[in-house]
């Protein structure tokens, strides 16, 4: 678990009790990079609510730009199916960088977090079969997403060599692109900072800059 994630969640104010409870649960499962992947049932149990209500709170947290959910799929006997969701908490990158990795505390009972060497928890990594399944499930090509068709092809292709499809779908997908100014407008300031940090060299090579966030745009109805 990450102390930085829990401190960040405690500082988030103005949320209804149920939504704050779910955010605190995710922060309790987050690793040092702000990622968490507990099952929906685990989130509901720890937050003291039904899975259906917990799912609703997760949608609200995404609308509030506090988390980004990245679904994972797997090929089974009956076809492609979603197995889990990886949640990225919107913790400022400078706070994550200051998080010293302490020895992992004992896992809580029922924790859905695989452990690697040295006690560090390792986020689930998508295999090639899972990537193919994700492409079929989303109905999109393995190299290009339809919601990123307006982005420069060289940017998307180079980004795919650094990140997987779900990352691009979650972070680059919501962006708008100004081809005249070669400017990428992220959905919020956190997204812009994260994209610039993770794809700095890619952006420079494609001559693309990060522009003003789209925070002023009307928020979608999570229902």
Image (tube, rainbow, N blue to C red):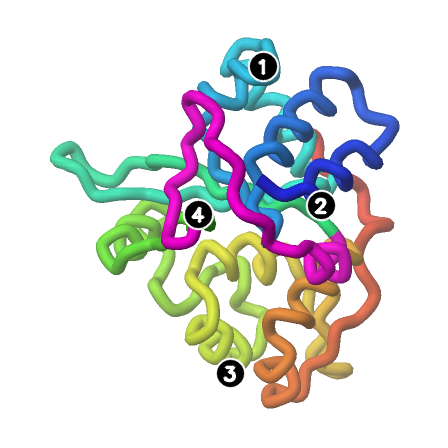
What is the spatial separation of the Cα atoms under label 4 and label 3, in whole angstroms? Answer: 38 Å
Question: Within 10 Å of the Cα at label 3, are there few (<14), some (14-19), or many (20+) other Cα atoms?
Answer: few
* Residue with the mark numbered 2: 4
Q: Where's residue 97, x and y in %?
A: 70, 62
* Residue with the mark numbered 3: 154
The tally of labels here is 4
What is the spatial separation of the Cα atoms under label 4 and label 2, in whole angstroms? Answer: 18 Å
Query: Which is more N-terminal, label 1 or label 3?
Result: 1
In the image, what residue occupies the spot 55% across and 53% down?
170
Magenta-drawn stretch contains 117: yes
Query: Which is more N-terminal, label 2 or label 3?
Result: 2
Q: Are marks 3 and 2 in contact (CB under 8 Å)?
A: no
Q: Nearer the viewer, mark 4 or mark 3?
A: 4
Query: Which is more N-terminal, label 2 or label 4?
Result: 2
Badge 3 element = helix
Q: Where's residue 125, x and y in %?
A: 36, 54
Extreme residue toward the left, this view: 77
Q: Is residue 134 left or right of residue 219?
A: left
* Residue with the mark numbered 4: 119
Check the image and report above or below for 89 versus 13.
below
What is the spatial separation of the Cα atoms under label 3 and label 1, in whole angstroms? Answer: 41 Å
What is the spatial separation of the Cα atoms under label 3 and label 2, in whole angstroms? Answer: 35 Å
In the image, what residue occupies the spot 60% across and 54% down?
101
Q: Nearer the viewer, mark 3 or mark 2?
A: 2
Query: Which is more N-terminal, label 3 or label 4?
Result: 4
Q: Quadrant of the N terminus?
A: top right
Q: Nearer the viewer, mark 4 or mark 2?
A: 4
């Amino acid at each position: 678990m990450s102390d930085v994630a829990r401190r960040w969640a405690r500082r988030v104010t103005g949320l209804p009790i149920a939504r704050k409870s779910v955010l605190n649960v995710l922060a309790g499962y987050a690793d040092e990079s702000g990622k968490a992947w507990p099952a929906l049932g685990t989130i509901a149990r720890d937050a003291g609510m039904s899975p259906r209500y917990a799912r609703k709170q997760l949608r609200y947290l995404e609308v509030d730009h506090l988390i980004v959910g990245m679904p994972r799929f797997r090929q089974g006997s009956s076809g492609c199916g979603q197995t889990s969701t990886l949640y990225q908490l919107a913790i400022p990158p400078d706070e994550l960088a200051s998080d010293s990795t302490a020895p992992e505390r004992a896992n809580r009972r029922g924790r859905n977090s695989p452990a690697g060497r040295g006690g560090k928890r390792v986020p689930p990594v998508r295999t090639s079969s899972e990537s193919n399944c994700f492409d079929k499930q989303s109905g999109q090509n393995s190299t290009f997403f339809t919601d990123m068709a307006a982005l420069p092809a060289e940017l998307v292709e180079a980004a795919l060599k650094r990140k997987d499809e779900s990352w691009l779908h979650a972070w680059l997908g919501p962006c708008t692109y100004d081809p005249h100014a070669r400017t990428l407008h992220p959905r919020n300031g956190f997204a812009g900072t994260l994209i610039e940090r993770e794809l700095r060299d890619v952006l420079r090579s494609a001559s693309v800059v990060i522009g003003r966030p789209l925070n002023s745009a009307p928020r979608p109805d999570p229902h």
